Structures are given as C-alpha cells and as structure tokens.
Amino acid sequence: TSPEDAKANDNASLTIQAFDMEKPEASSTVVLRTLVTPIFYLLWDCDVTEKWINPGESDTFTMRLTNYGNVVGTAQIRVEIQSDLRGWYASLDKEEVMLRGGESTTIKLLVKVPAAALAGQRLVIRTVAETFTMTQKAYIETTAFVNIVHNIEPSVETGEVQVFPGQTAEYIMQVKNDGNGEDKVELGVVSTQPGWVVTFEYTNLEVDRIIVGPRTSKTVAIKVRTPYEAEAGAFPTDLVLRDAGGNDNHVTVMTKVTQIYDIDLKCSQVHQVGT
C-alpha cells in the first residue's frame, strides 16, 4: 500500500524469495515493482453559497478550488447559468489555474443584479472546473436572490376642501409602489381635530390597509367627517402610510370649515317713550 502523500510516478520494488527449508539451495525469487498512478483530482469549497442582493447592485462569492491529487495540472474554469433570467451578469476573476498536488486557490465569482429585478427572483450559477482533456471535472452551485426594496410614494390629488359643519370632506390619494415587490401598506391617522372622524375607502369599501403590487399604484379615498359643532377655519389632518418594512410615509390634507352666521336676539321687556 502506498502512502497518502505519495507522489506521481513514485516506484517501489519488492523481492519475494521462496526456498526449501531442508534444501536451501532449492529456491526461487520474484521481483515486484509498483508505480504510483498520477491523479489530478479537483474539489470545490465555498463557505457562503447563497446571497441576497439589492436590485442594481452586485456581490461576490469567494470559492476555493483544491487539487487533491498527486500531480501538477491545469484546469479551465467557466460559468454556467442555470436560471432562465435576462439582464443578470456573472463573471470570474480567473478562467485558468495551475495546481500542484494538495494545492488550493481562491476563485471569485461576481454577480450583478439588474435594476429591474423583482423581489424573490434568483439566479442559480454553476461554476465548473475541468482539465483540458476533459478527464477530470468538478462543479459548485451558488445562488443569488433579489432583496425586496420598499418604496411607497403617496400623493394627494385633492387640495383644500371646504365644508359646512357636519359635512364630510373627501380627498383622492394615489398610493404608488416604486419598490420591486408586493407591499402591504397600513393606513393610519397621526392627528386630527377633536370630534373629527377619518376613514379610508378602496373600491367603496372601508379599509385600514391595502396591498400594492410592484411598480403599480392604487387609488384610496380619504374621508374626513366634521361634527356639527366644528369650529370655523382651516385645519390639517396628518396621515401615515406604513409599508411592510416598517417605513412611514406622511401626508397632510387640509379641511376648511365654513363659518355660519346665526344671531338670535331676544329681549324680555320693551319700554317705549314718545308719541
């Protein structure tokens, strides 16, 4: 048995002799010769095989390629894209390496995500190392996932609304999702006047949250109901929209309550002087 660290083409000779115990002159000898077979054996290793990357950004996978054989050899390295996605970019810092027996080298794989990538999309990349004679081949798979980016942009299309006390002011708000994934948006009130009631409606139904798809928008009606004893003047109502990532977006609507003149003059006694 050859040792594990035997070099390629190392050889050894073994002589075996057989003889008669009573007649030693009667003997026979055979010589055995062994030769260590040259092996170029490649294996990949990578500490992190999955990464989450923001749209339009890039990240690097650091991999190790080791020759566990006993002979010097050269390997060519290439990338195979396993996912059917367009616009992604993957490249290696080395396309050919020479390794001695037991030697390792570091290979870096750069992956760039397109700016228009949607949350949750993934790219599976197979990095292949093989000899020029195709007699030895090793591969490793890495996966790049697209992070979700929250970007809710609310805008109120209605300006200041004027109402009489007891009436309801209505505002139209567009909730646009400029992010790359579906987002659940919670609708809330930060502050309003005492006694005022604020509600949100989507498709004529009262809601406290909506779901907006990536790069789409939804129309929400904001209704501010004033009490009959509302004070005259212009007053703000501050609203907040919170996305699934916990980010807050604030909007303000202005409601002007019209002043009503109502004078009631009474007198208990009337005193007249004159003719």
Image: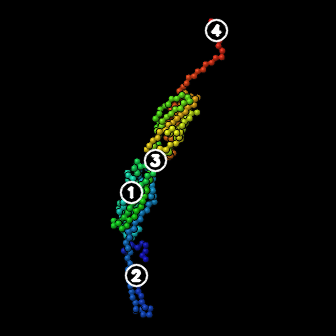
Look at mark 2 in the image and give the residue it sits on. Answer: 14
- Give the Cα separation between the discs numbered 2 and 4: 154 Å
Type of amino acid at the residue the image marks with label 1? Ile
User: Disc 2 or 3, which lies upstream in sequence?
Assistant: 2
Q: Which mark is residue 273?
A: 4
* Secondary element at tag 2: strand
* Residue at left offset 44%, top offset 91%: 21
Q: Amino acid at mark 4?
A: Val
Disc sitting over residue 81 in the figure:
1
Residue placed most toward the observer, 208 or 47: 208
Q: Position of residue 204 (x, y in %)?
A: 51, 38
Q: Which residue is mark 3?
A: 181
Q: CA distance from mark 1 to mark 3?
A: 24 Å
| Quadrant of the frame with the C terminus | top right
Residue 157 percent across, percent down from the top left: 46, 35
Is residue 35 visible to the viewer in this orientation of the structure?
yes
Query: Which of the marked residues, 4 or 1, is nearer the chain's N terminus?
Result: 1
Q: Within 10 Å of the Cα at label 4, are there few (<14), some (14-19), or many (20+) other Cα atoms?
A: few
Please, which residue is most extreme toward the bottom here?
22
Q: CA distance from mark 4 to mark 1?
A: 109 Å
**Residue 249 image position (x, y, % from top left):** 49, 41
**Residue 225 position by quadrant:** top right
Badge 1 or badge 3: first in the primary sequence: 1
Query: Percent position (x, y) of residue 76?
Result: 35, 62
Q: Nearer the viewer, mark 2 or mark 3?
A: 3
Q: Which element is circle 1 on?
A: strand
* Alpha carbon distance from label 4 to label 3: 85 Å
Binning the other alpha carbons within 10 Å of mark 3 as few (below 14), some (14 to 19) or many (20 upward) gives many
